[in-house]
Image (cartoon, grey):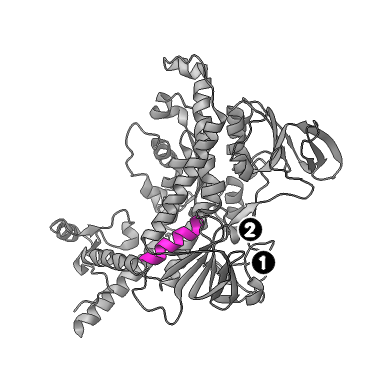
Amino acid sequence: MQSTAAVSVSASAITSGSGARSEAARRPGGLRVCGLRREALACSSLRISQAPARLAVARAAAAAATNGAVAGSGGFDYDLVIIGAGVGGHGAALHAVEEGLKTAIIEGDVVGGTCVNRGCVPSKALLAVSGRMRELHDEHHMKSMGLQVSSTGYDRQAVADHANNLASKIRSNLTNSMKSLGVDILTGVGTIVGKQRVRYGKVGFPDKEITARNIIIATGSTPFVPKGIEIDGKTVFTSDHALKLESVPDWIAIVGSGYIGLEFSDVYTALGSEVTFVEALDQLMPGFDPEIAKLAQRVLINPRKIDYHTGVFASKITPAKDGKPVLIELIDAKTKEHKETLEVDAALIATGRAPFTKGLGLENINVVTQRGFVPVDERMRVMDADGNVVPNLFCIGDANGKLMLAHAASAQGISVVEQISGRDHILNHLSIPAACFTHPEISMVGLTEPQAREKADKEGFEISVVKTSFKANTKALAENEGDGIAKLIYRPDTGEILGVHILGLHAADLIHEASNAIALGTRLQDIKFAVHAHPTLSEVLDELFKAAKLQPREERGSKPSQPPQPLLKALSFITALLSSSIRDRQR
């Protein structure tokens, strides 16, 4: 008799040759897992019956009806309590309920966190407006396509309302998705008061204490404001204030030229502002691949009403008042000598973000933050002051500082739930993509070229770099958007993809083929055979992968590459399931 916990795998399918393919073809009800490297799996077809899938659906429905409490909670109020209902907490909560865990999420502000309410979501609404404005203002671009635009303009309040309405809609969607699955949403500020114990409450109301088998910290971050900068929210402000678009200043200084600063420069210049960047490092866009940053400066900075100061700190910023402008005192980043004072209409502080971890009660469990970040290991398990793992306590997202991106927080949360559910899982952060939604967009995954060369020098291998241009892509040319480049950094001896960087039309969408390839361990010798629809922008990546020059097959054969780690884990999992099924039949 087959165990209900085991996935039914056709043993005859885990063989090579046409027989396995014929068996799978004769059973259309079966699910074939495609795209796995044949040499890694040592088989040509893998068939999994649909019965377990139906069982999984039934279990998920039961979990939703009882808030995941399919199994008992062992005396705890919850199997999992999540402190923070941002994108990371939301992703973890949904996956936990699917896994049959009784789950609660504590939120002291509003569901959605920074991303939905004060970050990626409303900023994309503003960037959508800036993109349309750029198109309409580009008379040459319009005429080349046979279009004529007599005049353009915008309603500032309507633009601001568009961003606010989008945030409200997404916030409502997240809330409803958790409620529909039975996640308990507890309102208040969460504090860890001891092992597997959390207290939460609102000002003016008595606190409540609950117990949980496992706890996830997902409290996110807030804008970082350096010393000497006075924020008034009107003329000197952070991205939190800027997203409200209460004004469009004639001249605005943006302190910091990373993702946030670059995106807001796109918005403000499209709406008519002049922009001055203030960057502490010697080059703009310091976090990007240097070659991509150089090209991006040529496309996104130089043609626009933007100037910049690099290698300087804004040591003091005073808001506008009594008819005086905003004053920005600049000092040399190295010598700290005064260089000049800028007078502008407004200043946006885009100097990064700081973890929001105060008041969590970490001192109650002997945890000391590092620059505000909660220390974790590769499995997101919280580490105490003595370097030991704190049992049943995890931290994800901006609060741990590993990779301060909303989708990284969600991925970390799902990884933690996998571990809680009894399946070891380590997230490969090098496979997580990032994007800057300027016009055109910038995206990246993996290592930059300097990082890859440093790694190659340390580990004793060679790297190669190839590039393709959007000017050779039919779809990009049809859109009159030929400005762009894609760059691949790889190992010619193994075909491993080390990094991909894209500047061009819809770069943020294109990057996922590369990020998924890195996550799955797909090598260039395999992905070269993938088929892309024509004419599409995806062919930029197709040409990029095909342009890679690998060592001759016989030379690569002398250095056999290991099967990708996810596939090894899949094989181990399948073997365990087969063994379980055989034991059950023998009973």
In the rendered image, residue 91 lying in the magenta stretch gets the answer: yes
> Label 2 amino acid?
Pro
The reply to whether residue 275 is visible in this rendering is yes
Looking at the image, which is closer to me, 425 or 73? 73
In the image, residue 555 above or below residue 231: below
- Residue with the most extreme front position: 204
In the image, residue 226 above or below residue 466: below
In the image, residue 514 above or below residue 267: below
Total labels: the figure holds 2
Looking at the image, which is closer to me, 556 or 515? 515
- Main SS, magenta region, reads helix
Determine contact: label 2, label 1, CB under 8 Å. Answer: yes
The residue depicted at 65 percent of the width and 49 percent of the height is 352
The residue depicted at 23 percent of the width and 68 percent of the height is 9
Q: Quadrant of the C terminus?
A: bottom left
Residue 286: image location, x then y, percent: 65, 43
The residue depicted at 49 percent of the width and 28 percent of the height is 132
Decide: few, some or many residues near mark 2? Use Cα within 10 Å; few <14, some 14-19, many ≥20: many
Task: Provide the residue designation for mark 1.
Answer: 369
Looking at the image, which is closer to me, 129 or 511? 129
Residue 233: image location, x then y, percent: 69, 42
- Residue with the most extreme bottom position: 587
Residue 213: image location, x then y, percent: 48, 76
The Cα atoms of the two marked residues, 2 and 1, are separated by: 10 Å
- Residue 355: assigned label: 2
**Range of magenta residues:** 86-98
> Label 1 amino acid?
Thr
The residue depicted at 47 percent of the width and 27 percent of the height is 482
Point out the tag, 2 or 1, that comes first from the N-terminus. 2
Residue 212: image location, x then y, percent: 49, 75
Tell me which corner region of the image, top left, top right, bottom left or bottom right, holds residue 282. top right
